């Protein structure tokens, strides 16, 4: 009989503390995150950075009430080692990737600072609501020590919601990345509505909740043997009432498919498609998220579906 504890991985758990007008999310990522990281041969510093970004995406994206809504995080830098970081969350699915200068990174210490990686960088956080078509975006400087600090500033500055964000990234016994995160928010007017300009960052209810949240260690968040419910209990077991919500499973969610790629290419004119094609007449589309190349014969896009069936070049991973 196996007495080892079950690993609690790849899910987000929501909870509320009614007496403190607060809500929270906890997430733990394992295989789903590892599948995203494994698509690229990232060095440790870049791998850890993307693991943190994916954890933040899951935490923030899980606050969306719109099941088809999307949360996107993106940072670009003209002078930094990291030139592009992008990840998003939609309906429990995560994806993300990083572009970086490998030569400059090799000259840096093993654990470079956020400033060393981005320089004077900025983080853009965008909420897209599919049901209403509304979009909310905030841009904050990457002037803290972590991406989590930037996300925390986003909520305080752009959303006027007092927020605490904590993220832990570690490795398990097999050397695989495990990441966990905590997001706490003070919502004195409840979770409905967005007008919270009057919210006080020094509200006594929020000070109490934030002080408890700050005791959560990064090692606890990234410990797969600790159920998320246990972590909630550790923080708030003395509260009068804590309501634990249904959890959301997290999976890798790159949305590229051969059918989708063909549909996008089909929107271009015949002449444009011929210009895109190589000497074989093949247009090769490279998905940056999952590192898969989708080759399509340009001339096939003008044929009927039935005539395309036997002419599909092999899909490859770079």
Image: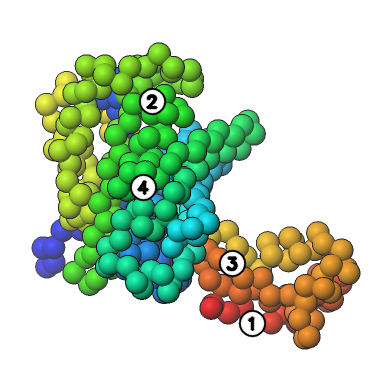
State the mark number for residue 38.
none
Q: Residue 244: image x %, image y %?
A: 28, 33
- Residue identified by numbered label 3: 287
Q: Which residue is depicted at the point 33% across and 64% down?
A: 45
**Residue 225, percent across and down?**
18, 56
Mark-to-mark CA distance, 4 and 1: 38 Å
Q: Earlier in the sequence, mark 1 or mark 3?
A: 3
Secondary structure under tag 4 reads helix
Circle 2 residue? 161
Quick check: can you spot residue 18? Answer: no
Q: Quadrant of residue 10?
A: bottom left
Ranked by sequence position, the earlier of labels 1 and 2 is: 2
Query: Which residue is under mark 4?
Result: 147
Discs 3/2, front: 2
Horizontal arrangement in the rendering, residue 1 relative to residue 11 (left or right): left
Q: According to the image, label 1 marks what residue?
A: 314
Q: Are marks 4 and 2 in contact (CB under 8 Å)?
A: no
- Label 3, label 2: how far apart the Cα atoms are: 36 Å
Helix, strand or loop at mark 2: loop
Is the C-beta separation of discs 1 and 3 under 8 Å?
A: no
CA separation, marks 1 and 3? 15 Å
Q: CA distance from mark 4 to mark 3?
A: 25 Å
Which of the marked residues, 4 or 3, is nearer the chain's N terminus? 4
Mark 4 or 1, which is nearer the eye?
A: 4
Numbered disc in front, either 1 or 3: 3
């Amino acid at each position: 009989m196996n007495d080892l504890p079950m690993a609690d991985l790849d899910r987000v758990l929501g909870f509320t503390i009614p007496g403190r007008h607060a809500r929270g999310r906890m997430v733990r990522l394992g295989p789903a995150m590892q599948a995203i990281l494994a698509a690229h041969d990232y060095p440790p510093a870049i791998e850890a950075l993307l693991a943190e970004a994916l954890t933040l995406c899951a935490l923030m994206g899980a606050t969306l009430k719109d099941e088809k809504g999307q949360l996107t995080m993106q940072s670009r830098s003209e002078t930094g080692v990291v030139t592009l970081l992008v990840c998003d969350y939609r309906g429990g699915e995560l994806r993300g990737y990083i572009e970086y200068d490998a030569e400059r990174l090799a000259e840096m210490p093993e654990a470079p600072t956020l400033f060393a990686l981005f320089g004077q960088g900025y983080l853009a956080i965008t909420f897209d609501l599919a049901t209403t078509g509304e979009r909310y975006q905030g841009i904050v400087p990457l002037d803290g020590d972590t991406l989590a600090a930037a996300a925390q500033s986003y909520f305080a500055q752009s959303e006027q919601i007092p927020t605490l964000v904590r993220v832990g990234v570690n490795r398990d016994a097999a050397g695989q990345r495990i990441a966990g995160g905590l997001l706490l928010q003070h919502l004195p007017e409840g979770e409905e509505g967005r007008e919270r300009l009057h919210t006080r960052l020094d509200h006594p209810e929020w000070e109490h909740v934030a002080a408890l949240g700050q005791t959560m260690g990064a090692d606890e968040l990234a410990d797969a043997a600790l159920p998320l419910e246990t972590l909630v209990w550790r923080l708030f077991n003395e509260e009068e009432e804590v309501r634990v919500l249904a959890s959301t499973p997290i999976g890798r969610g790159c949305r590229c498919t051969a059918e989708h790629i063909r549909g996008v290419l089909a929107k271009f004119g015949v002449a444009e498609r011929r210009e895109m094609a190589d000497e074989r007449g093949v247009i090769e589309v490279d998905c940056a998220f999952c590192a898969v190349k989708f080759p399509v014969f340009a001339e096939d896009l003008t044929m009927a579906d039935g005539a395309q069936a036997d002419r599909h070049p092999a899909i490859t991973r770079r």
